Each structure stands twice: as C-alpha cells, then as structure tokens.
Image (tube, rainbow, N blue to C red):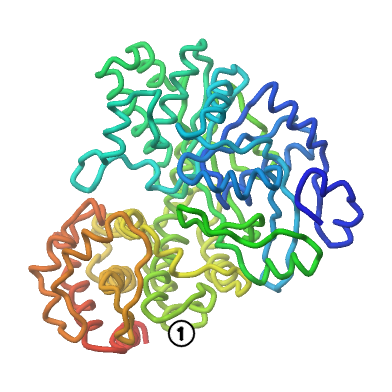
C-alpha cells in the first residue's frame, strides 16, 4: 500500500490494515481549494500535519466545508519536496495511546504544499495568486517562537532581516517578511480582509506576530517600497486581524516502532528522512491523543466552523488565561525542567524520566506546589484537571517517543515565560514568599549546569540548538565541573539579572543566591546533579 491518491483506491486493503481513510472526495476538495482558497498555513511540520490539518479533515467529513488547506514553508523546503509532493500532500497520522494501541488515519485535507522562497518562482506565484483571492479567510503559523524573532538579545536586527528590509517585498526570505509581502499583494488586489493567526506554542503569539509584521511594513514604508495606506490597512484589525491562540499537543519525532508497525501493516515508503536543515521527519506523524486549541474569534473575512472540530473559539482574555495556565504553570515548565535534567542524567525519553523518583517530585513541586497557588483559571478548562492529566497520563505515556533533547531546543526563548511569569506572580503577592521556591530555582540552576555541555558523569554532552547557546556558554566559560567556586556571583549576576532571559531580575528578586548555591552544589563533581536533586527533593 502506498500513501498517494492512487494508492488509496483499494479502500478495503487499508481497512484490513486498520487504517482509517478520508470520508470525503479529495479530488473535489482540491478543485474547490484551487478555485476558492480559504486557508493558508505556514510551517509544514508535525504539529500542523498531525493536529491542525486533522481539524480541517473533521470539518470536511462533516460536510461543513468544501475546501482544504494550502501548506507553505519558508524555512525547510525539503519538507515539501520529500514529505508532501511524493505523497500527494497526505499524512499518515498515528495516535499513540497509553495502553500501547495505535490509532491510524490518513489525513488528506491539505490540497497543496508550496515552497515560499525566491528560488521557487512558480510556488511564489501561486502564493501571490492565493493572497489576491477575496475568498482567503486566514493564514496561520506553526513556525516555532524563534520564527517571529527579528532581533538578537541586544535588540539589533539579524543580518538576514536587515537584508529583507533593504530588498523589499520582491526579495525577502524571512517568514515575517514573506507575510508582509503577501499582505502587500492582497492590499494591491483590493484589500479584502484577512485573519493572520499564530498557532505557535508561545505567549501572546498574536501580539508577537503582529509586532513583527508591522516592523517589516514600517521599515519598507521608510524605504518607499510600500505605501502609508498599506501600513494603515495592516494596522486596522477590522481589516487584518491577529487573533491570539493557545495550542497543546505533543508531536515528537517519528518513532522506529511506529515505522515498523506501518511496514508490518503493508504501508510502503514510511522511512523518516533528515532534511538539509536537519529536520527529522517522516511521511507519518506519531502523537499523543490529547489536544487543545483555543482561538480568539476575530476573523474579519469569515472562518471555518472550527468549534465543530473541537476548537475553543472565544475571546482574547480567555485565550490569554488558558495560555498562561498551560505555558506558565501546568505543562511547559514541567517539560523544560524534565528536558534539561533528562539530558544531564542520560535519559532519552520523557516518559522514562517520569519513573525517576526525583524528577517526578521535581515536576510535582513545580506544578502542584509552586504553580497552582498562582495559576490562572481560564474558565473553560480546569487547571487541576489539566495538570493531573499532564503528570498522570501524558508525560508518563511510554509510547510517546519524546526526548529531553528535543524539548531542550531553544530553552533560552522559553524560560522567561515558563518560569519568569510564576516568579513575577509571587513577587506581586505579598502573602507569598518567592525565596521559598525550590523547584523553579532547581530548574533554572539545572539549565545553567546543562549549558556547560557536560553530563552528570562528567562526560561531554551535546546541547540542543538554541539561538543564545554560544553567547550563554561564553558567559559561563569560567564555570567548571569540580570547581564550585567558579560559579561565582560575579560570573552569574550578568545572566541572572538579565530580564530578557527570565522576564525578571533574579538578583533583585532574591533568587540569585538560591540558584547560584544549587549550581555550585551540582559542580562538586560527577554525580553531583543527582545528589543535589536528592538533597532538595528527597
């Protein structure tokens, strides 16, 4: 069996293999999308293929919509060439249940995959055509938090962003510049309204997206590439809205066990590939079943009935509260703590870490003891129910092949929200003692220890990709395993006082001494990370 339009013709064969096929006419969907495109999505990776595209599939199968999604990528064009086009833009979705069962389904709601880059003029021409169409209702994104960044920690524009400013709409490369260029195309074609929706796992994602797009527009206006009228159009959220959202679903890298199970079922060509941008990706997506998407309901040109697919369509305050609940308290801080300590202690599975007594106590301390007292209740979900699901079911699921190394990626971009916001909440509440925190300081100290690129056995360890990795490692260059005093106040203060890193000055907050002391204990020698965890957590 081959995952392609022709390969799905023998439906009985797929049914026998236990794989659910789409219940709609895919050819008709593609025709409708060509004629009246309604949804473009940037970021063609796993979270899109395994979650967002499935939402559209559910609506197609209910007969509530007729068209599909156009997927585009501005960063890793190999995904389109190697994962979309050979499989007619379809994905084999595998849900990994805690009892070991796999639910398998072909997702066929993506009509087309496009490479959004200057080297692919035909694809860009198609994108421009799509954005000129009044039928286009929304453009969405899963490009990771760093995909919205235009500047470094010093506030200086990245060279490739500066180049986009100088070249204008016709020569840009960055995702935010490409968005601005395509909106310019839409404005010139009559300026039909549109929603520009970040679905990335970051705080105030719509605000970040809007700020970055507007920065590009303003820079182009200064240089005469676009008009003041265009800038005013983008700024007018009755014309171009930037809804906020909260997304939650774990979609780890492809698992060997899933690849083998699909091969045993008779599905051909499921082997993963590593792209030239080092993306490890496969024609299938494996993921947990639990999923949440909460979206601010501001779509000036209409939208699909996403609530019929399980999406919470609500107001900005509710999105913000839900996002704060998840990202600052109930999931993401736990994930990051597990990530850095998992790497230090030699784990290659998040689920396996949850069997470690100290690491389980660490996430319980951060979540239940330190997070829940300041948690934001969104009203649509129970924080305690949510965190219980995370700690008792999701993180320990042994069939989710998620690794601490993957979760440790871009940690510098995550700590301000995942830990800094809770610290700020403690500082704002006089009845709470921020210096009494233990789990969060341990997580931050563990991250600093992780940045030394030496594991708890004293062996070299590779750190995951992070835009701040070289700079932070440079600041910690004098800190050495076996020399606790090397982690002096003078060395740590520039890092711990950096509000861009932590959203708060940890020195002024009174936490620098605790964090520095914990780090020094972890530097005593091999095994010191473990002994420090035992000391503070039992």
Q: Residue furthest right?
A: 12
From this view, report whether residue 232 is shown above or below residue 522. above
Residue 307 percent across, percent down from the top left? 65, 39
Which residue is located at x 84 percent, y 62 percent?
A: 17
From this view, report whether residue 37 is shown above or below residue 54. above
From this view, report whether residue 435 is shown above or below residue 78. below
- Where residue 63 sits, quadrant-wise, is top right
Which residue is located at x 60 percent, y 72 percent?
A: 397
Instruction: Give the residue at mark 1.
Output: 357
Which residue is located at x 15 percent, y 84 percent?
A: 483
Residue 353 percent across, percent down from the top left? 48, 78
- Where residue 31 sits, quadrant-wise, is top right
Residue 522 percent across, percent down from the top left? 25, 82
Residue in the foreground of this view, choosing between 454 and 376: 454
Residue 12 percent across, percent down from the top left? 92, 54
Q: Is residue 361 left or right of residue 292?
A: left
Q: If the image is split into quadrants, where does the C terminus sit?
A: bottom left
Which residue is located at x 58 percent, y 59 percent?
A: 273
């Amino acid at each position: 069996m081959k995952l392609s339009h022709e390969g799905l013709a023998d439906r009985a064969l797929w049914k026998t293999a236990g794989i659910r096929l789409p219940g709609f006419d895919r050819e008709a969907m593609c025709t409708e999308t060509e004629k009246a495109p309604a949804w473009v999505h940037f970021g063609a990776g796993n979270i899109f293929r395994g979650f967002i595209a499935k939402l559209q599939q559910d609506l197609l199968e209910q007969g509530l919509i007729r068209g599909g999604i156009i997927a585009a990528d501005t960063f890793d064009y190999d995904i389109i060439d190697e994962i979309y086009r050979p499989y007619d833009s379809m994905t084999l979705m595998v849900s990994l249940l805690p009892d070991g069962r796999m639910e398998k389904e072909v997702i066929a709601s993506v009509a087309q995959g496009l490479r959004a880059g200057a080297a692919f003029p035909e694809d860009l021409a198609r994108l421009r055509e799509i954005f000129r169409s009044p039928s286009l209702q929304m453009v969405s994104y899963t490009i990771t938090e760093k995909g919205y960044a235009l500047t470094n920690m010093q506030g200086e524009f990245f060279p490739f962003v500066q180049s986009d400013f100088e070249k204008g709409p016709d020569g840009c490369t960055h995702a935010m510049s490409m968005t601005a260029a395509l909106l310019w195309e839409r404005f010139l074609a009559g300026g039909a309204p549109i929603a520009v929706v970040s679905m990335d796992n970051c705080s105030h994602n719509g605000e970040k997206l809007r700020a970055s797009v507007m920065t590009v527009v303003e820079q182009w206006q200064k240089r005469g590439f676009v008009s003041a009228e265009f800038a005013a159009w983008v700024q007018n959220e009755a014309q171009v809205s930037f809804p906020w959202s909260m997304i939650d679903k774990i979609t780890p890298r492809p698992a060997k066990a899933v690849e083998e199970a699909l091969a045993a079922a008779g599905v051909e060509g499921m082997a993963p590939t590593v792209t030239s941008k080092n993306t490890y990706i496969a024609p299938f997506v494996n993921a947990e079943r639990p999923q949440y998407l909460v979206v601010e309901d501001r779509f000036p040109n209409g939208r699909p009935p996403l609530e019929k697919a399980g999406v919470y369509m609500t107001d900005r305050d509710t999105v913000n509260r839900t996002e704060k609940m998840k990202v600052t308290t109930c999931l993401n801080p736990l994930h990051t703590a597990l990530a850095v300590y998992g790497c230090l202690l030699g784990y290659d599975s998040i689920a396996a870490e949850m069997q470690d007594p100290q690491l389980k106590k660490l996430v319980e301390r951060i979540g239940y003891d330190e997070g829940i007292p300041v948690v934001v209740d969104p009203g649509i979900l129970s924080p305690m129910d949510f965190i219980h699901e995370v700690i008792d079911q999701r993180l320990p699921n042994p069939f989710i092949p998620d690794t601490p190394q993957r979760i440790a990626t871009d940690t510098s971009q995550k700590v301000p929200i995942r830990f800094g916001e809770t610290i700020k909440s403690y500082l704002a509440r006089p009845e709470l003692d921020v210096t009494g925190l233990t789990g969060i300081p341990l997580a931050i100290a563990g991250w600093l220890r992780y940045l030394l690129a030496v594991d708890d056995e004293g062996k070299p360890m590779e750190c995951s990709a992070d835009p701040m990795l070289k700079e932070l490692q440079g600041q910690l260059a004098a800190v050495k395993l076996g020399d606790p005093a090397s982690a002096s106040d003078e060395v740590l203060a520039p890092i711990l006082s950096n509000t861009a890193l932590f959203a708060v000055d940890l020195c002024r907050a009174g936490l620098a001494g605790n964090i520095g002391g914990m780090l020094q204990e972890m530097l005593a020698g091999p095994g010191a990370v473990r002994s420090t965890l035992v000391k503070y957590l039992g």
